[in-house]
Image (cartoon, grey):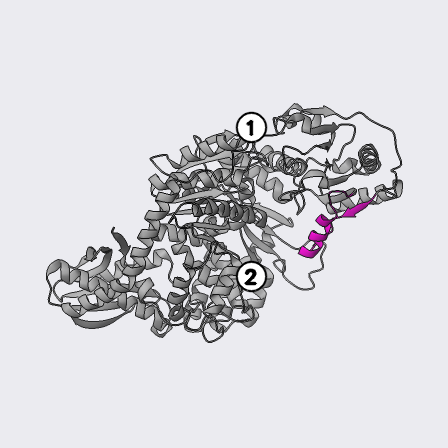
């Protein structure tokens, strides 16, 4: 059994020591790094070799990599590192890692060319001043070989353990049976489609799967992907979620797989890592992430090996409580320990942003380690809005003002130039909101100069995390990065203060916001799909599929499956209420009819209901009319800014034997990801089409999508499809199992339209609700 490792990965495992240190020090960009390497090489003499491919063997461990450069005239091997600021800013633990890499390459070169002695050099190149600092050590080949063998020996035990784990895991998965007694209706069909997608020889394949609640989508996607991994050589499986509910369901499904594996003699458990957000796992939120501030960062890499070994002895999964206990036992940061364990996990359950965001950890590791991964995207309809937010950047005038006050002279001068450019743009803008075809060149140049100036300053004088200058730097850096990729998939818009607001001598730019607003995330996501061997995006609402293909960067030939619902039409009574209009202009006339409709249904069939509205204002107005006309009807209302405790209390009212109506906002906390089976919820009223508000921003997004996709799609892509998706999600709260019975009332005359009906689930049998007169609700 052999194991192959890259030089960098070997050294990161064996040679990292000292503190975890995340104090911000601006690093050169990838382009600056490549340009720096090229410039250093161009200064070398004739015969200088670049990108020297090297391979070596230690017992059953193969080590490979590419040395940056070798000068056969001086017998000097060079490892080039770029940086900003002063050389003293390169932390000692980074230098130790750099020397380790250089010495490993030195041994491989001596071995390949039969050299008895070699000069090994670290070349530090300052991308700002273009100055080189060359640090040279002369080593005998025997000494380099001894260093190489020492590092390999430290890694080899772990490598053999990992290779053994993988071999045993793949054998166990090959023999794995479905963890449940039988497949649910539709679950086998889903599993077969996922398996075939993962088995595609070419890789990079995608599948869209629409399947309602109740068929077991989570296990129906995880199980076949794991089965296919054995002969496809998948290194990792990433299960990506938008909400905590999906997170929990994934861990439950993986626990059932591990229970099944436990029945096989000698079969290892899958290593399941639950990646949590930093704010949920940080033990010292008041401290900075470096050894001089946080005790859990001090000596992090010295204590990491013991914690890593201990993690393998833990029962699965590696969830937040288990990792916290392990981390604190070894005096390590739980959040960064979890990130280290990504390397040694089989399955990672994480939020979307860990793979799809600009600097996403899981995607970066996949590229760096050349992993072959399977990606499962839970409730994939959420990825459209989430990805838009990932690839939207704002510059706030208030943030800039704070930074100008706090900055030193050099940085303030650059920020002043940015402010002047901003003022010019604002002065020329007549409306409070305006979108532009491109980012003005003068403004972008001012942003770039400000970023460069701050970066050079920070390299010499690191700032604390809450410093205003650092805040504007992060905003500007993201803005600049997106400006460089600006195109028809995005808007550049400027929002000024309201024109009737007294500026009191302040410029028109005061209080304004510059925004590069993503409209179509497809260009950013397509490369992420291509980086995976197989990606399956699944949800109960992926209709129409063309919309999601276009928005999510999926190829036109992406596979599509709509799994037949396990429910009978008779389980759900769906009625359209066409005599009521919920349009904004008609709302005043809708309050009493909606109140009476709710009371009539409650009198007919007492129990628990949810009633969804397009806004908190609309909700409140209908609630007041309902309470006045039907005072004995039990109501409880969602309110703005409900915390977790309040949301839990709201849902706690929905008991098996309870009665009453919860008023909630469509698209909010209670219209998706809420599971109220049985008689905990027997019906829902949806008093809206769910269409996003018509406002200047959405109208500009509509125009952008008209240009991008064609004039017949802008309205549907901006308003209709997102709105109806929220309606179907909310209605989906009612029927959660094959035993549930319930009713859904779709309140608006537009639900009569054929085009609207076509976007509703095919298993629904929709009928028009007959009008009834006013009623008084009975006592609960």
Q: How many marks?
A: 2
Residue extent of the magenta highlight: 634-658
In the picture, the disc for residue 564 is 1
First in residue order: circle 2 vs circle 1 = 2
Q: Nearer the viewer, residue 696 or 87?
A: 87
Q: Position of residue 730 (x, y in %)?
A: 66, 39
Q: Nearer the viewer, residue 721 or 180?
A: 180
* Depicted 447 relative to depicted 137: above or below: above
- SS for tag 2? helix
Q: Position of residue 193 (x, y in %)?
A: 45, 32
* Mark 1: few/some/many CA within 10 Å (<14, 14-19, 20+): some
In the picture, the disc for residue 279 is 2
- SS for tag 1? loop
Q: Nearer the viewer, residue 592 or 560?
A: 560
Residue most toward the bottom?
292
Q: Position of residue 593 (x, y in %)?
A: 83, 34
* Depicted 26 relative to depicted 576: above or below: below
Q: State how far apart marks 2 and 1 are (Cα).
A: 40 Å
Q: Toward which corner of the image does residue 28 lie, by quadrant? A: bottom left
């Amino acid at each position: 059994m052999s194991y192959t490792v890259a030089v960098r990965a070997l050294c990161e495992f064996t040679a990292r020591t000292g503190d975890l240190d995340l104090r911000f020090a601006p690093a050169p960009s990838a382009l600056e790094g490549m340009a720096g390497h090229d410039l250093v090489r161009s200064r070398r003499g004739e015969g200088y070799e670049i990108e020297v491919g090297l391979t070596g063997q230690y017992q059953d461990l193969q080590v490979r990599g590419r040395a940056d450069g070798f000068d056969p005239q001086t017998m000097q091997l060079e490892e080039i590192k770029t940086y900003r600021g002063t050389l003293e800013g390169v932390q000692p633990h980074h230098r130790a890692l750099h020397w380790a890499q250089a010495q490993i390459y030195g041994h491989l070169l001596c071995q390949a060319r039969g050299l008895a002695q070699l000069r090994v050099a670290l070349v530090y190149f300052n991308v700002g001043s273009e100055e080189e600092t060359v640090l040279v050590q002369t080593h005998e080949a025997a000494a380099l070989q001894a260093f190489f063998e020492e590092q390999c020996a430290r890694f080899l035990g772990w490598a053999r353990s990992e290779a053994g784990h993988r071999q045993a895991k793949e054998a166990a998965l090959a023999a794995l049976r479905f963890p449940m007694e039988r497949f649910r209706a539709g679950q086998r069909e889903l599993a077969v489609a996922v398996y075939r997608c993962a088995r595609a020889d070419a890789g990079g394949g995608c599948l869209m799967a629409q399947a309602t609640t109740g068929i077991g989508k989570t296990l129906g996607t995880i199980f076949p992907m794991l089965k296919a991994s054995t002969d496809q050589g998948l290194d990792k499986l990433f299960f990506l979620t938008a909400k905590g509910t999906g997170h929990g369901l994934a861990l439950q499904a993986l626990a059932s797989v591990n229970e099944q594996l436990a029945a096989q003699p000698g079969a290892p458990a899958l290593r399941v890592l639950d990646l949590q957000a930093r704010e949920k796992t940080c033990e010292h939120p008041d401290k900075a992430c470096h050894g001089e501030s946080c005790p859990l960062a001090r000596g992090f890499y010295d204590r990491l090996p013991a914690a890593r070994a201990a993690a393998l002895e833990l029962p699965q999964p590696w969830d937040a409580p288990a990792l916290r206990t392990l981390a604190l036992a070894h005096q390590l940061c739980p959040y960064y320990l979890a990130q280290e364990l990504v390397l040694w996990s089989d399955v990672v359950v994480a939020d979307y942003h860990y793979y799809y965001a600009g600097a996403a950890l899981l995607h970066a590791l996949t590229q760096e380690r050349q992993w072959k991964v399977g990606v499962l995207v839970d409730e994939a309809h959420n990825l459209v809005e989430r990805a838009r937010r990932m690839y939207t950047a704002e510059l706030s005038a208030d943030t800039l003002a704070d930074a100008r006050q706090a900055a030193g002279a050099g940085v303030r001068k650059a920020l002043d130039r940015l402010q002047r450019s901003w003022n010019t743009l604002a002065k020329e803008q007549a409306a409070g909101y305006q979108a532009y075809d491109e980012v003005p060149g003068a403004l972008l140049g001012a942003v770039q100069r400000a970023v460069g100036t701050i970066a050079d300053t920070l390299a010499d004088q690191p700032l604390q995390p809450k410093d205003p200058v650092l805040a504007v730097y992060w905003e500007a850096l993201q803005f600049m990065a997106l400006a460089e990729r600006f195109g028809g998939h995005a808007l550049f818009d400027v929002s000024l203060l309201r024109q009737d607001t007294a500026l009191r001598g302040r410029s028109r730019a005061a209080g304004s916001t510059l925004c590069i607003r993503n409209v179509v995330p497809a260009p950013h996501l397509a490369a992420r799909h291509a980086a995976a061997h197989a990606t399956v995006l699944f949800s109960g609402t992926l209709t129409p599929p063309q919309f999601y293909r276009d928005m999510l960067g999926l190829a036109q030939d992406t596979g599509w499956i709509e799994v037949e619902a396990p429910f009978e039409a008779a389980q759900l009574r769906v009625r359209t209420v066409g005599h009521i209009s919920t349009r904004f202009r008609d709302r005043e006339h809708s309050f009493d009819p909606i109140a009476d409709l709710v009371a009539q249904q409650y009198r007919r069939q007492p129990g628990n209901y949810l009633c969804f509205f397009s806004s908190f204002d609309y909700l409140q107005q209908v609630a007041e009319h309902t309470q006045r006309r039907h005072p004995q009807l039990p109501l409880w209302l969602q309110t703005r800014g409900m915390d977790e405790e309040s949301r839990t209390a709201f849902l706690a009212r929905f008991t098996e034997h309870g009665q009453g109506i919860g008023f909630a906002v469509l698209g909010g906390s209670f219209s998706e990801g809420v599971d109220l089976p049985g008689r905990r919820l027997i019906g829902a009223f949806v008093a809206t089409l769910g269409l996003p508000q018509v406002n200047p921003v959405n109208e500009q997004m509509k125009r952008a999508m008209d240009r991008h996709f064609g004039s017949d799609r802008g309205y549907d892509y901006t308003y209709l499809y997102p709105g109806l998706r929220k309606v179907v999600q909310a209605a989906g709260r009612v029927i959660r199992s094959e035993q549930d019975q319930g009713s859904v009332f779709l309140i608006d005359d537009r639900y009569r339209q054929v085009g609207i009906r076509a976007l509703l689930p095919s298993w629904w049998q929709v009928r028009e609700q007959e009008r009834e007169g006013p009623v008084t609700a009975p006592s609960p």
